[in-house]
Image: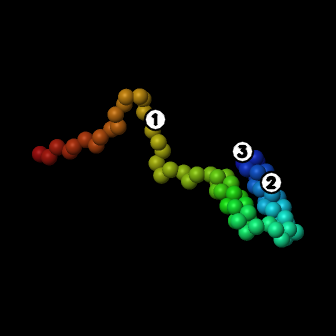
Amino acid sequence: MIVSNKELALRLDELENKAELMELKHDTFSHNTRVQLKQVFDAIRELMTPPAPSPKPDRLRCPGEKPNKPKAIKKR
């Protein structure tokens, strides 16, 4: 998966460079189109970043199992 992410990142960089070259060559390339392409590239990069690990591991529960409640401490 890491290799495919690196390959995807390289391809994304290539596409972004090609889009920038198109902007330079064509004066008719509208500002809105440039902004939209940048948003697409940024969104794809954000989706490629792995999620942050959760602070504590999740515990799988059986269907119908109720979550554990803390037990009350009896005072003497």
Decide which of tag 3 and tag 1 comes sooner along the chain.
3
Mark 1: few/some/many CA within 10 Å (<14, 14-19, 20+): few
Amino acid carrying label 2: it is Arg
Residue 3 image position (x, y, % from top left): 76, 48
**Distance (Cα) linking label 3 and label 1:** 25 Å
Q: Residue at x 79, y 51 (%)?
A: 7
Pointer 3 residue: 1
Residue 43, placed above or below residue 69: below
Quadrant of res 22: bottom right
Mark 3: few/some/many CA within 10 Å (<14, 14-19, 20+): few
Pointer 1 residue: 60
Amino acid carrying label 3: it is Met
**Distance (Cα) linking label 2 and label 3:** 15 Å
Between circles 2 and 3, the one closer to the viewer is 2
Decide which of tag 2 and tag 3 comes sooner along the chain.
3
Residue 50 image position (x, y, % from top left): 62, 51
Check the image and name the residue furthest to the front: 28
Pointer 2 residue: 11
Q: How many marks?
A: 3
Q: Using residue 57 as the reference point, say whether residue 20 is left or right of it.
A: right
Residue 12, placed above or below residue 73: below
Mark 2: few/some/many CA within 10 Å (<14, 14-19, 20+): few
Q: Using residue 5 as the reference point, say whether residue 46 is left or right of it.
A: left
Q: Residue at x 71, y 65 (%)?
A: 32
**Distance (Cα) linking label 1 and label 2:** 38 Å
Check the image and name the residue furthest to the top: 63
Secondary element type, mark 3:
loop
Quadrant of res 67: top left
Color style of the picture: rainbow
Q: Quadrant of the N terminus?
A: top right
Q: Residue at x 37, y 30 (%)?
A: 65
